[in-house]
Image (cartoon, helix red, strand yellow):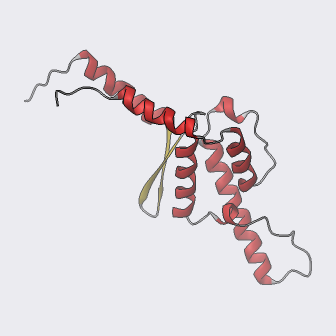
Amino acid sequence: MCAYTVSSDTLFTLIMLILYIAYFTVTFSVNNNMVTIEVLTGSNFKKWKEDIEFAMEMADVDLSFVTDKPWDLTVASTDDEKLVHAAWMKSNRICLLSMRRSILDHLKSSLSTDCTAKELMTAISERYRVSSNADIWSLLQVLFNMKYDGN
């Protein structure tokens, strides 16, 4: 039997890492590949947007991100138009669900509930404009979390 001793700092760090992964990520499987979306906290918009776009592309449901909403169906709609409309609606529904599940509750409350995924992404983008200050902040977070290891 092997016995390991772990310092309290290391144990605390491991617990915090586990809590972070459990609370601040959304993970699902797409085509036997695990896709993780970091939860939008307000300061990580750039990473969150990249995660969402990548996950929707991997799931092949990004149609509502790259195209506008098709016209409503009519009696004269062709079978092709009906197929495109159904695919777009499914894509929009999945994208909206994925986006809303990966946003903290207190940030969701002011977002529109009757919009397309593209409109929601635009609204969130306007709220959390990525600026050079955001990039500086993310670099500072990396710097602050570094630990000197003797090298």
The quarter of the displayed image where residue 89 is located? bottom right
Estimate the x, y position of residue 10 in percent, counting from the top left: 26, 22
Question: 56 or 66, which is in the foreground?
Answer: 66
Asked if residue 29 is positioned above or below residue 75 in the image, the reply reads above
Residue projecting furthest to the top = 8
Q: Residue at x 42, y 61 (%)?
A: 32
Asked if residue 101 is positioned above or below residue 28 in the image, the reply reads above
Q: Residue at x 79, y 51 (%)?
A: 115
The quarter of the displayed image where residue 124 is located? top right
Residue 44 visible here: no
Q: Residue at x 19, y 21 (%)?
A: 6
Estimate the x, y position of residue 97 in percent, counting from the top left: 65, 49
Asked if residue 42 is positioned above or below residue 92 in the image, the reply reads above
Residue projecting furthest to the right = 75
* Quadrant holding the C terminus: top left
The quarter of the displayed image where residue 14 is located? top left
Estimate the x, y position of residue 135 in percent, counting from the top left: 51, 39
Residue projecting furthest to the front = 132
Residue 35 visible here: yes
Estimate the x, y position of residue 126 in percent, counting from the top left: 72, 43
Question: 24 or 76, which is in the foreground?
Answer: 24
Q: Left or right: 77 with respect to 123?
A: right
